[in-house]
Amino acid sequence: MREQVVQTKAVVTVSEMARMCGLSRSRFYQLVEAGVFPQPVYCLANRRPVYVEELQEVCLEVRRRNCGVNNQPVLFYARGHRLNPQPKPPRTAKPKPPKVNEHADLIDGLAALGLPATAAEVESAMTALYPTGVNGTDRGEVLRGLFLFMKRQNTGGSAGR
């Protein structure tokens, strides 16, 4: 197993010490109460528990050797909680299944009326005409609206543009 080097600081909080050991804060406190890790010292200014550099080295040595300061062996189970967490690679979006042409009947209807259209043209016209959807609207009315909309889009003046 490869040794990982953890940098010590002049003073760290209990939470940071737990993180340096690769444990949750609550598990770290349990092990402090059991005598596996040394008790923190308290800052006189604000009574906050901290670990000075010497105590950090003791805690890291306990973690490395799996033997507490009370000379009892201890097993650390920290699956998925690494000392130096590696960033996870970004998730790639799953490819969407190809869209089934849900407007095939409308495309056929437009072709029967003499207006050939592609699925993309029908889809863009549908979103322009019915932004909230066509729920409950008669398909004949939808076909009529599409025909008029697309006929207006394809006027003689805009054919060359």
Image: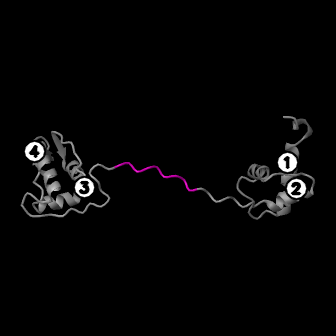
Query: Residue at 76% across / 65% down in the picture?
Result: 136
Relative to 95, say whether 50 is above or below: above
The amino acid type, in three-letter code, at marker 4 is: Glu
Relative to 124, say whether 135 is above or below: below
**Which image quadrant for residue 108?**
bottom right
Q: In this rendering, which labeled residue sits more in front, label 2 or label 3? A: 3
**Which residue is labeled 4 in the image?**
54
Quarter of the image with the C terminus is: top right
**Callout 2 touching callout 1 (CB < 8 Å):** yes
SS state under label 4: helix
- CA–CA distance between discs 2 and 3? 69 Å
Q: In this rendering, which labeled residue sits more in front, label 2 or label 4? A: 4
Work out whether mark 1 precedes mark 3 in sequence or the reverse, and give the earlier one.
Answer: 3
**Which image quadrant for residue 139?**
bottom right
**Callout 4 touching callout 3 (CB < 8 Å):** no
**Which residue is labeled 2 in the image?**
110
Q: In this rendering, would 130 be left or right of 143? A: left
Q: Which residues are magenta?
A: 86-94
Label at residue 1: 3
Work out whether mark 4 precedes mark 1 in sequence or the reverse, and give the earlier one.
Answer: 4
The amino acid type, in three-letter code, at marker 2 is: Leu
